[in-house]
Structure formats: C-alpha cells, structure tokens
Image (cartoon, rainbow, N blue to C red):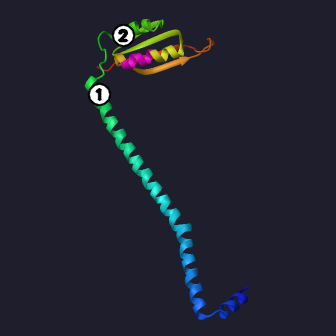
Amino acid sequence: MMDKLQGWWRGISAREQRLVAVGGSVLLIGFCYWVIWQPIGNRIDERERQVLSQQQTLAWLKEKGEEVLALQGGQGRQLDTSGTLEGVVNRTAFNQKIKIARLQPQGQELQVWIDTVAFDDLLIWLATLADRHGVQVQVIEVARENLAPGLVKVRRLQLSRPQ
C-alpha cells in the first residue's frame, strides 16, 4: 500500500505535489479545527454562560437573604415568657388537648409525664413550646408500649426555659 502511494507521489509533477501538500495541509488544519478546537471552544463558552448564570443566581439569593434577615430583625420574634414554666406547660398542653399525668418542678426545670398521647400532637406541642415560649427539651423518653399505632407514652420529659 505504501509502495503504491510512493509510486503515485513520484509519478506526479512537482507542481501537483505542492498542490497536494498544500491541499492536504489545509484539510488537516480544517479537520483539527472543526473536530477538536471548535467543540472545545463551544463547551468553554457554554460553561462560561453557566457560571455567569449561577453567579447571578447567587447574587439574587444573597440579596433576598439579606431582605429576609432585615425583615426578621425588624419584626423581632417575640417570645411569650410571661408566667411560670409550669403555667406555660399546663396552658399549652390544655390548648393542644394533651392530658398531663404529672408535673414535678426541679429547680429551673420541670419534669413532665404523659400517659397516652398521639406522637404527632406531642411534636406539635413541643414545637409550640420552643417557638412561642422559648421552652427547651432537655431530656425526653418516649415508649410505644402496646398502644394503638401513633400513640406513645411519655415516660420522662424534662423541660427548661433559659432565664
């Protein structure tokens, strides 16, 4: 195969050899451009557009985050810290229709026992205590104990409210 190609090359005139060499070089350069360089350039341009779009999104999110923080700071989440911890626990439990079996104050903390309560109602009540009254759960021990699905017994719940 190579011999045939070399024979053909020797058989053409010097002028034709130059024309074939220049044409082949142009084809090789064109091939490299359209197969290698242009796709790489297109991908680079696409990535630059993606980065610009993401930078704009980030700037927008930062701006909106600052607005949210400013709004939160302006309103200021007011905690209802009036009344004793026992009073707040009793009142909110009554509002959530949770029946407390026993309360026992221990210094700045309060031990609570609940015989049977729906687990979802318990979580809502604890979230209300935390969000509206600043009450923190220190310890919680919950058991299912042969109760209907979704019901639990609170063996120990220790609550506190920072002073």
- At mark 2, the secondary structure is helix
Say whether disc 1 or disc 2 marks the residue closer to the N-terminus: 1
Query: Does residue 50 appear to the left or right of 77 in the view shown?
Result: right
Q: Is residue 13 left or right of residue 84?
A: right
* Residue 71 disc label: 1
Q: Is residue 135 visible?
A: no
From mark 1 to mark 2, how far is it between C-alphas?
Answer: 28 Å
| Chain part drawn in magenta | 125-131
- Where residue 11 appears, as percent x and y from the top left, is 67, 93
Taking the magenta stretch, the answer to whether it contains residue 32 is no
10 Å crowding of disc 1: few (<14), some (14-19), many (20+): few
* Residue plotted at (46% across, 16% down): 124
Q: Secondary structure at mark 1?
A: helix
Q: Amino acid at mark 1?
A: Leu
Q: Amino acid at mark 2?
A: Val
Above or below for 74 versus 66: above
